[in-house]
């Protein structure tokens, strides 16, 4: 007699599915997930895990958290990150110490895999929300992430 | 000319006063043809828009809302775009059949539209074998699909067309048998007679349990008949590109596309006429105003169209073997038993009548 129970189960599961989509249909007014992008450009807030580009946040004293350890450069699978570093005299201890000169980021080569951000021991780089990255010249996609005259935030290396 | 062209009674009298009878008949036929072409085009474009909006709401999107007020002109713009596109074709296509195929599809759905009663007097062709004619005509459309698939000289198109043949031949049985179940109550194939019978209760109420089963079977097989999801193996995008109309472009593609939506409307209109009383208002509340019948008819039809769209955006596509299992092992036996039950109910006078 599985024939009739099959028919019953079939009808029941079809109605269950229809009730699920029916609920979505009735709630579609409130929960439309579409962004009307160029119109709401001013108020558009990208979601938290959005991978737009890699940025290096600086605090108000123009200090970043990058120690120049180059782990991100090693982790990057396609050579997007290039760290140009130098040795400078540390003011407090007077010893010679490694510091970054330029954190070069080639956005044109980046696949947004996020390995650099995962591997960074000091959380110096993170995901940015900007996605309007189109430019007329490819060279403009090469960016220097650390601001000019910026320094390492004290206490990061301790 | 014994075809009752009752839509145009007034126009008929007026035309007779200014020209001989045969000329008047020809002018009337041209006018009705143009009217139904206009209905066809407007309905097709509106249904495409409706489908897109409803699909968007089911998927928590917004849908087309840019062209015109709330996107109402979107499909107009699409039709204009398709009109202006080049009609391409493959070099090894059978040119004659290739060009003929869209007209088969569109003519068959137009012919089916002609027998559907919109309201009391708005009925182009009140033939006494109405349901039989509808069943016969709705399976002519598949010839267009088969021709299109064959003549394109494209493997995917041919596979799509063959699947369509399998599907239509199978599900034709269920459509016919489920309508036959209701004809046991009405005792007539003429659509105006069927509606006349329903003045003492819609057939789905009159025939209670077997009528509800017949309605469910009709909606399932009707969805399959009009090649819509979940039975859209004819144009399964993930398997066959666009299926039988892969090689068509521009307006010829639009003909296939419009005919598909008109077929959906026709299936819903037959269901509304046979099961839900067509243009009759519920409990006869607007019986004194006959032209409101159009409103009731379209209301019932669009509720059923919405039901078919709900199917489409809920159920996943069937495989070919599942499709045939559903028809031959489930729908057909259920249908045959259902006919016997209905015959017993009519014989023992167990129908519910007000």
Image (cartoon, coloured by chain):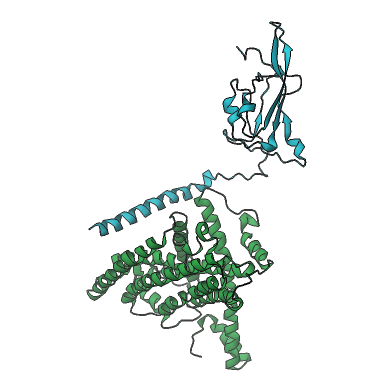
Front residue of B136/B342: it is: B136
Q: Is residue B1 above or below residue B306?
A: below
* Side of B15 relative to B341 (left or right): right
Q: Nearer the viewer, residue B89 or A148?
A: B89
Residue A18, relative to residue B220: is it above or below? above
Residue A17 image position (x, y, % from top left): 40, 51
- Residue A143 vertical placement versus A92 (above, below): below
Q: Quadrant of residue A95?
A: top right
Q: Residue at x 52, y 54 (%)?
A: B55
Which residue occupies 55% across, 82% down?
B8
Q: Is residue B118 visible?
A: no
Q: Residue at x 37, y 54 (%)?
A: A14
The green chain is B
The chain letter corresponding to cyan is: A
**Residue B115 in the image: above or below residue A124:** below
Percent across and percent down for residue B28 are: 58, 84
């Amino acid at each position: 007699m599985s024939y009739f129970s099959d028919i019953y189960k079939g009808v029941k599961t079809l109605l269950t599915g229809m009730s699920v989509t029916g609920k979505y249909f009735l709630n579609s007014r409130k929960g439309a997930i579409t962004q009307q992008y160029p119109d709401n450009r001013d108020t558009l807030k990208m979601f938290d895990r959005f991978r737009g580009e890699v940025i290096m946040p600086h605090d108000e004293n123009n200090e970043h958290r990058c120690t120049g350890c180059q782990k991100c450069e090693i982790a990057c699978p396609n050579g997007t990150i290039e760290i140009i570093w130098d040795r400078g005299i540390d003011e407090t201890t007077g010893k010679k110490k490694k510091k970054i000169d330029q954190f070069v980021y080639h956005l044109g080569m980046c696949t947004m895999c996020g390995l650099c951000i995962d591997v960074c021991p000091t959380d110096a780089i993170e995901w940015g929300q900007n996605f309007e990255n189109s430019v007329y010249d490819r060279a403009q996609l090469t960016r220097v992430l650390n601001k000019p005259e910026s320094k390492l935030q004290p206490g990061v290396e301790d | 000319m014994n075809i009752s062209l009752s839509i145009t009674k007034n126009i008929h009298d007026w035309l007779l006063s200014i020209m001989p009878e045969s000329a008047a008949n020809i002018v009337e036929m041209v006018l009705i043809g143009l009217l139904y072409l206009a209905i066809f085009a407007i309905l097709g474009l509106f249904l495409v828009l409706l489908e897109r909006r409803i699909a968007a709401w089911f998927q928590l999107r917004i849908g087309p809302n840019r062209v015109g007020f709330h996107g109402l002109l979107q499909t107009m713009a699409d039709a204009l775009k398709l009109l202006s596109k080049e009609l391409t074709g493959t070099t090894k296509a059978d040119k004659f059949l290739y060009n003929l195929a869209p007209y088969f599809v569109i003519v068959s759905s137009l012919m089916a539209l002609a027998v559907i009663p919109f309201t009391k007097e708005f009925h182009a062709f009140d033939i006494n074998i109405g349901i039989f004619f509808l069943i016969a005509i709705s399976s002519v459309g598949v010839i267009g699909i088969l021709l299109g698939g064959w003549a394109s000289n494209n493997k995917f198109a041919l596979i799509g067309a063959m699947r369509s043949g399998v599907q239509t031949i199978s599900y034709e049985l269920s459509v016919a048998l489920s309508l036959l179940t209701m004809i046991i109550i009405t005792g007539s194939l003429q659509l105006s007679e069927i509606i006349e019978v329903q003045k003492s209760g819609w057939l789905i109420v009159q025939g209670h349990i077997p009528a509800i089963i017949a309605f469910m079977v009709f909606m399932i097989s009707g969805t399959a008949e009009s090649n819509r999801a979940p039975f859209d193996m004819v144009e399964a995008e993930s398997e066959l590109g666009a299926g039988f109309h892969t090689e068509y472009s521009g307006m010829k593609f639009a003909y296939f596309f419009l005919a598909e939506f008109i077929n959906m409307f026709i299936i819903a209109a037959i269901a509304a006429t046979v099961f839900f009383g067509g243009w009759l208002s519920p409990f006869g509340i607007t019986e004194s105003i006959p032209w409101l019948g159009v409103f009731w008819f379209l209301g019932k039809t669009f509720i059923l169209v919405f039901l078919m769209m709900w199917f489409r955006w809920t159920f996943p596509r069937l495989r070919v073997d599942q499709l045939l299992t559903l028809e031959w092992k489930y729908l057909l036996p259920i249908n045959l038993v259902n006919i016997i039950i209905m015959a017993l109910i009519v014989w023992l006078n167990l129908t519910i009548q007000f």
